[in-house]
Image: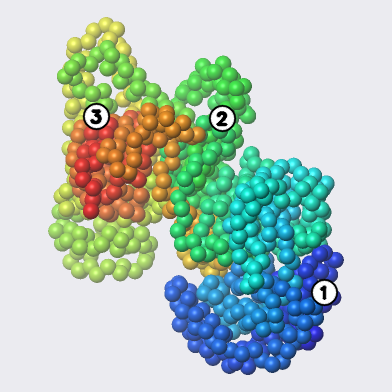
Amino acid sequence: MNSEYILPLSGGRAEITLERAGGKAASLARLVEAGLPVPGGFVVSTAAYARFVEENGLRPQIEAALATVDPARPSTLEAASRDIGDVFAGGSMPDDVAEAIAAAYGSLEREPAVAVRSSATAEDLPNLSFAGQQETYLNVRGVEAVQAAIVRCWASLWTARAIGYRARHEIDQGTVRLAVVVQRLVAAEAAGIMFTANPMNGRRDEVAINAAWGLGEAVVSGEVSPDTIVADKATGAVREVTIGDKAVMTALTPGGTAQQPVDPGRRGARVLDDVQVAALVSLGRKVEALYGTPQDVEWCWAEGAFYVLQSRPITTLESALLPGNTGLPPGMGSHAVTDSLQGGVWRSDDLPGNAEALGTPRSSAACSTTAECQAGAWRSQEKVPPPSEWKVPNPKARYMRNNIVELIPDPMTPLFATLGRRVINERMSRAMAEYLGRSGLISDEIVIPIHGYAYYNGEFSRGAIGWILLHSVSIMRRMFTGAIERWQKARASYKAAVADWQAQPWRTFSTTEILDAVPAVLGEAIAYYVACVSGLIPAAWISEGLFTIVYKTLIRRRDDPDAATFLLGFDSVPIRGEKALYDLASWARARPALTRLLLATPADRLAAQVSASASAPDTMSVPPEISEGWEEWRARFRGHLAQYGATIYDLDFQKPTPADDPGPTLGTFKLFLRGEGSDPHARQAAAAARRDQATQEVLQRLRGLRLRLFRTQLARAQTYAPLREDGLADIGWGYPLLRQMLLEVGRRLVETSAMDAAGDVFWLTEAEAREAAAAIDVGHPVACMVESVQARIALVQARKQVSPPPSLPLPPKFLRRLLPAQFGVEPRQEEGADTIRGIGCSAGSVIARARVLDGPEAFDQMEPGEVLVAAITTPAWTPLFAMASAIVTDVGGPLSHGSIVAREYGIPAVLGTGGATRRLRTGDRVRVDGTKGTVEILERAS
């Protein structure tokens, strides 16, 4: 063989360096040297690639095509790739290179069918992964066909994806080269993937195997549901087998390969028997011993023997832990199984596009594990289908969208689903053990994800239920004794912790230290929430409920007002915030020139000026005569945000607070500045007057026991009602700091070119963020995560297209038609139905246009007089109530924030519809009846 252009896989490992042969070839040569069964072949070195480029004068044409590339514009990458591909296709193989390839191929005897596979010089490295960016060609036969396939492999060095990847990492495009591996193609009877540690639960004493008929392409591309086998690593004994429906297989054809249907008798037949599994596990142990770390091994079975086709490391096994699972799920036929994360939040079979975007970003060698085998089948998928089935971990348990979950209405982002959910479960488990008087009665996973949506885990054993019932009195006593005092103590602790961290020079900390601070601050926030939900908020619910029962059954006359009238007109943090904003608008309206400037300036530009530091230059063009008023307004608005800007829209810290993004608050401010909306002072005074008048009328006519009951129950309800809103409003006290910390981590990742924007950090898992932080702290490179982030955003958008059932598992279909939305799926709520049913939470009826809002980023779209339609409303949504004519939500009930505030504003509210945000469109003309609890669609928007 020509040692310059051709390198042998067997006996030539000293010559097969990364620079000459690429990562794939180097790995295969190592396997061959260790005596492992690898199909024979040879390597076409990077020198041959360089000779082809030089002989055909391609360098200037490549550089010209690359000159127009902008990594942020995919169209420029595609254009450059297309142009470079054309010049490669027009080139001719140099004679000396062609002769060397012909001789090497001839040495394989009888012109066999071969696999021609790219081997990049930066492939399968710990910090950079180019896997899947170049091509593989199977069942190539004949010298000319092999030479043509090699040229196509060389050209694939310049795919749009590879060009963009190198550009983002500032890799000199002129230095890259590509080697090509040519191997005998084994006519596999069966093939698949073997993981020498179980990536689904992290167990290193187990081996996980996927197996299907034919060549392995159908398995690695995810086009077939393979058999899934979990075996003991030490003995090879089978622990679990799941038979897949192997409908198709990759088979050899005269011109290459093709997907063919599997004979009906073999579709459900087991591919590997126990003896074969034991032999394959033994082979896996040898491969792992060679590399010293768990491996992801491509294998095939032919003519009574196993062959190793490729091996790569598995990383981030810890992030693959799946509570309650002991093996791979059926049909998990891809390397991307290593990317599965807790609770199935980020599973490979959920995600679109190429496999490197499937869960684990390319920050480690695990990325190359997923990419090459997945890219071909999934790259063409442009849209992620929304979930259609709602499977639960335990069909005998009940999973509910209530409790803390009501503050997580949307699918969770990866960082919150891992780091945030971990903190929630730790803090809530600790508190529940204290209140229940015993640990271990409930699952440590109190909040679990199902299709990314948070669900409250209702798994209780009979023993746990018995214990809780037997000790219910003492449990209730512990929860409700001193509820206000416990809440005040938790609030003081929370605010002190936030103040301590704000005083720290944390921006000078290492990236890992900043990440470590996040659970500390978030833990205080969740502890505070627990103090609210375990005493203050239930006390408010119970006291209002008891008062309503007493009033309705023993006191109310036909013409008397509703029970809610007696609980309105009190002050709370959201109401005080609205009044403060109204007062600021009144102050500005007294300065006509300043008012004109503020109304003429877009909210996003005003927000930028408000958010800029006090020392930052003012980029606003402000007339000199109002500059003093402008500066005073800016200082006043900043003061407003400092006092009221920490309310949250969602517990997921990816969502900005008003302090982070004052745009939505500025929208309400402008409403008041224009003289629109209701005066909150007058509205509150009127509600208080109605309350006091109604109270006095009842007190004057009651005597004896009914009078004592009324006074007692009313006093309790009026004590807790405003405190509940104060408690909810303060949950986000530390969120601006949390977001600043996480965005600082993101900013550092942007500096390494790992991400496009600091906010992309929220789309990493905790394990990934920690791995990247550790690399930053020691000065190691961090690989690109852009594609992973994009894929995960697409997945969340797909999941947001469906309404998560309020309770799982779903009741039988016939029963769903009889139950209200709060118990499953609302009956007869087909797309064309005219009426949506929920819970009437604030009386009255109104006809108006609907405005469906996903979150604060769309607040500026709200117009006065519209019906606000949202998944849920938290205190941060309160400014929009001033514009709304009615409120409709997917989640909630009579004691939810939305119902309470709607009654304060005197507008109808229908909550708990289960899916109004999916069934209504902005512009629909609707009738909202808060008395009946219905939303009638009168006219669809065009």
Q: Which mark is residue 458?
A: none
Residue annotated with mark 2: 396
Give the quarter of the figure containing the N terminus.
bottom right
Q: How is the image coloured?
A: rainbow
Picture coordinates of residue 493 (x, y %)?
Answer: 49, 39
Whichever of labels 2 and 3 marks the residue nearer the N terminus, that label is 2
The residue at 82%/74% (across/down) is 10
Q: Answer few, some or many: residues within 10 Å of disc 2's Cα (few below 14, many 20 plus, some between 14 and 19).
A: few
Classify 346 as above or below 7: above
The residue at 37%/34% (across/down) is 826
Q: Answer few, some or many: residues within 10 Å of disc 1's Cα (few below 14, many 20 plus, some between 14 and 19).
A: some
Residue annotated with mark 1: 10
Picture coordinates of residue 240 (x, y %)?
Answer: 71, 42
Which label lies toward us, 2 or 3?
2
Residue annotated with mark 3: 931
Judge from the rendering whether residue 261 lies leftward or rightward of residue 905; answer left or right: right
Picture coordinates of residue 875 (x, y %)?
Answer: 35, 41
Label 2 residue SS: loop
Mark 3–mark 1 Cα distance, whole angstroms, equals: 81 Å
**Residue closest to the eye, 262 or 436:** 262
Judge from the rendering whether residue 167 lies leftward or rightward of residue 136; answer left or right: left
Mark 1–mark 2 Cα distance, whole angstroms, equals: 56 Å
Which label lies toward us, 3 or 1?
1
Name the residue type under label 3: Thr
